[in-house]
Amino acid sequence: MNRRRFLTYLGIGAAGTAAGAELAPLRRPKPAPPPEEPRRPPPQEAPSPTWRGSERIVWSVDTDEPIASLSFDDGPDPEFTPRILELLDRFGVKATFMVMGYNAVRNPGLLREVVDAGHEVGGHGWSHLNLTETSLAETRYEIEHGNEVIEERTGVPVRVFRPPYGRFGQEAVRVLARSRPDLIVWSVTRGLLSWRDPRHISSHVLAAMGPGDIVDLHDGIGRGTFSPRSAPAQRIRRRREDEVQALDRILEGAQERGLRLVTISDLMAAWRPQTQT
């Protein structure tokens, strides 16, 4: 992680609470989450976080091995996730799915399929809010409640977390320091959002991807989940379809180049930090 890059990145968005302030107890943000999720009793007081640990903020990994990682945000979604799972299985690839907590509640069987196929599941917030625009209490609820429902439905601890839109502030870093998942961003994307030809998307990803890279793709539509018939949601859905259609070329191209695709946790296990001279 480049420290200067991180500090610049952390300055994006709303100003955070002072780093020394006490972490407030977990409370449900306003407006309330969608009605499908049952209301829970108020949480008990939680202790202040300890400022220790080895949590990392990761865009990519320094490694000598010919490995990289594919990740998929916003699912599980019945339209996209099964098709992605089929392609990954065909090429013998394991990936990381950054799961939206609300979708974990809506599609628990599909989430279980992801885990049973040997893929990693990470957190992506409860309802895909931009964490640079939320209060500390909202940020904590988005991260901790989202991770909690994923763990309840999979029996697997959440070890990695990606903030929606890749944006985060002090509040998200403070919450993750307490709950321990590494904060994962990415180093390669699909390219321009305006690209509709899957060949453009696949060519861009393959040209940009090399050892240690983390590629960000999608198997859901994020906030569009809550207004699926709206024009913005339909635009997002078309983009996701283009990504899915590009995926087989990406997988085939990586295989032809001898680049092995692994989960993010496996990629980080191969981390070989460059020594200072």
Image (cartoon, helix red, strand yellow):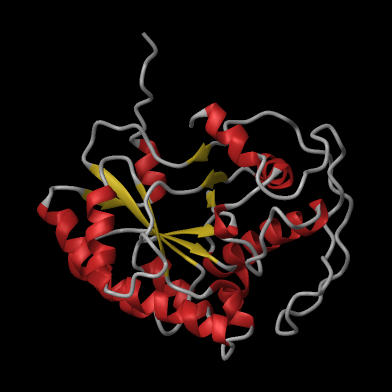
Q: Is residue 105 left or right of residue 47?
A: left
Which residue sits furthest left?
256
Q: Is residue 39 visible?
A: yes
Residue 8 position, x and y percent, is 60, 36
Q: Is residue 231 left or right of residue 258?
A: right
Which residue sits furthest top?
277
Residue 102 position, x and y percent, is 62, 74
Q: Is residue 274 above or below residue 235?
A: above
Residue 39 position, x and y percent, is 81, 77
Which residue sits furthest bottom?
229
Q: Is residue 199 left or right of residue 266?
A: left
Q: In this figure, what is the number of numbered marks?
A: 0
Q: Is residue 89 visible?
A: no
At a point 62% along the width and 33% down the height, the residue shown is: 7
Which residue sits furthest front?
194
Q: Is residue 179 left or right of residue 272?
A: right
Q: Quadrant of the C terminus?
A: top left
At a point 69% along the width and 57% down the height, the residue shown is: 144
Splitting the image into 4 quarters, where does residue 12 fall? top right
At a point 40% along the width and 70% down the height, the residue shown is: 194
At a point 23% along the width and 36% down the height, the residue shown is: 65
Q: Is residue 69 above or below residue 73?
A: above
Residue 86 position, x and y percent, is 27, 75
Splitting the image into 4 quarters, where does residue 139 fall? bottom right
